[in-house]
Image (cartoon, rainbow, N blue to C red):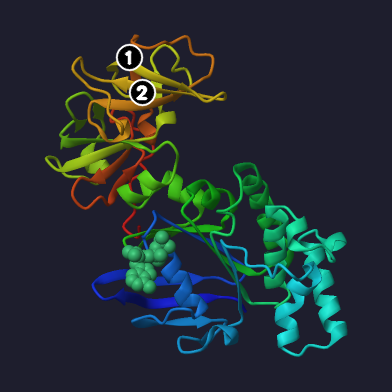
Amino acid sequence: MGNVTLEHITKRYDDVTAVDDMNLDIRDGEFVTFVGPSGCGKSTTMETIAGLTKPTEGTINISGRDVTDLPPKDRGISMVFQNIALFPHMDVFDNISFGLRLRDYDDEEIQRRVDHAAEVVQLEDMQDRMPEEMSGGQRQRVAIARAIVRNPDVFLMDEPLANLDAKLRVHMRTELQRLHKELDTTIIYVTHDQAEAMTMSDRIAVIDSGQLQQIDPPLVCYNEPANKFVAGFIGSPSMNFVDGEVTADGFESEHISVEFDPATAGVSVGSQVTLGIRPEDVYEVGKVSTVEDPTAEIDARTDVLEPMGNEVFIYLLLSEDAEASMDSTQSDDQLLMSTDPDTTLGENDTINVVLDRSKVHLFDAISGEAIAHGLADPTDASTAETGVSSSD
Ligand code: ADP
């Protein structure tokens, strides 16, 4: 039933291409999240599925029907938006049942559906409450219940948690996962918050400049990002990126060398590449017992420390004249390292660090496409190579 297919969807507003040749195949019962920076085209893509916006080109299929020219009400979808538009003068029951009454369902059927929806969102005892007597989270659950009673094939949710405070947002994430399990319905969800996308989704569709960059399960996007954009967008703080060149011995930049066999990694000697390494894959020498395959040591000086409670982020400067910049993860003479909260390091300490070679990513310096995820020690014949396969 609730499968959604987008074929070559493009949406142009004058000279702005909001969605650029989007192809997506969302399976029945999947929880798929559109994620990307503000203005990347998430909402517009969603609006074309909802029928609120007509695509300039392309077709949309829902539950096996071409719905490209159908109005929203005939598409078998229900929508939940960021702004919870409840009727202030109606109680919970009336708010939830409003759409059903417009559609001439009989009282018994309305009562049955509202009871079921209220139970799913755990508001069964609040059906006679007025919106003003409810918290933000409860009001959002009323909006979700209103979507549930329509019994849709597909739920469309556009930043439904954006107006809630941080604690409630985290709570509602769990609620939405429970809801998804209980209803066993397709959910398409829009957020700019990659943590929200990571925790709830079966698959994440990462979008940039109207173009789909990757659609995969969250951990695949994290561990095997298709390109530098996905690598930098998924994960917080961001992956470190260092530009360099491939030599016969491996990767070489001014401060970082990583030995590997270019042929095995599928990269040609002399090519310009960007090395990517996540903060948790940078280790202080002397505390590296957990790294099976460390790279050559890198001289560093600690700059700012950010204790997070469960870990500490340490900004490292790799040369004497390195200046701390706002975006350390993008600079060739800086690295961000995540380490244990019990570290004895302070500011301005001189240390050596290594990278976990098996966690080093390589990207084409120009196109940003991924070349390899995890490199192997060239002297260790038993280490498996994990280069990017051509299907990526
Ligand atoms: P997101 O949801 O990822 O923040 P949107 O889909 O809202 O992004 O917008 C994508 C791009 O399309 C942006 O550049 C935005 O300014 C533009 N856009 C969206 N809606 C309209 C519109 N009605 N008219 C003109 N431009 C629009």
> Residue 84: horizontal and vertical position, in percent?
62, 63
294 and 346: which one is in front?
A: 346
How many residues crowd around disc 1 within 10 Å: few (fewer than 14), some, or many (20 or more)?
some
Q: Which residue is mark 2?
A: 315
Q: Amino acid at mark 2?
A: Tyr
Where is residue 144? Give x, y as percent: 68, 65
Q: Which residue corresponds to mark 1?
A: 352
298 lies above or below 166: above
Q: Residues within 10 Å of mark 2 (few under 14, many from 20)?
A: many
The residue lying at 31 percent from left, 57 percent from top is 390
Pick whichever, 241 or 15, lies toward us: 15
Left or right, 270 with respect to 227, comes to left
Front position among marks 1 and 2: 2
Residue 267 at what x, y percent from top left? 21, 45
The residue closer to the viewer here, 97 or 316, is 97
Quadrant position of the N terminus in the picture: bottom right
Residue at the spot 84% in from the left edge and 66% down from the top edge: 127
- Local secondary structure at mark 2: strand
Q: Earlier in the sequence, mark 1 or mark 2?
A: 2
- Say above or below: 231 vs 295: below
Image quadrant in which you'd find residue 278 = top left
Q: Going 55% across and 50% down the picture, which residue do you hit?
A: 196
Q: Looking at the picture, does residue 236 appear above or below residue 41?
A: above
Which structural element holds mark 1? strand
Left or right of 197, for residue 167? right
Q: Is residue 21 visible?
A: no
Asked whether, in this view, residue 162 is left or right of residue 41, the answer is right
Quadrant assignment for the C terminus: bottom left
Indicate the position of residue 15 as horizontal and vertical percent values: 23, 72
Q: Amino acid at mark 1?
A: Asn
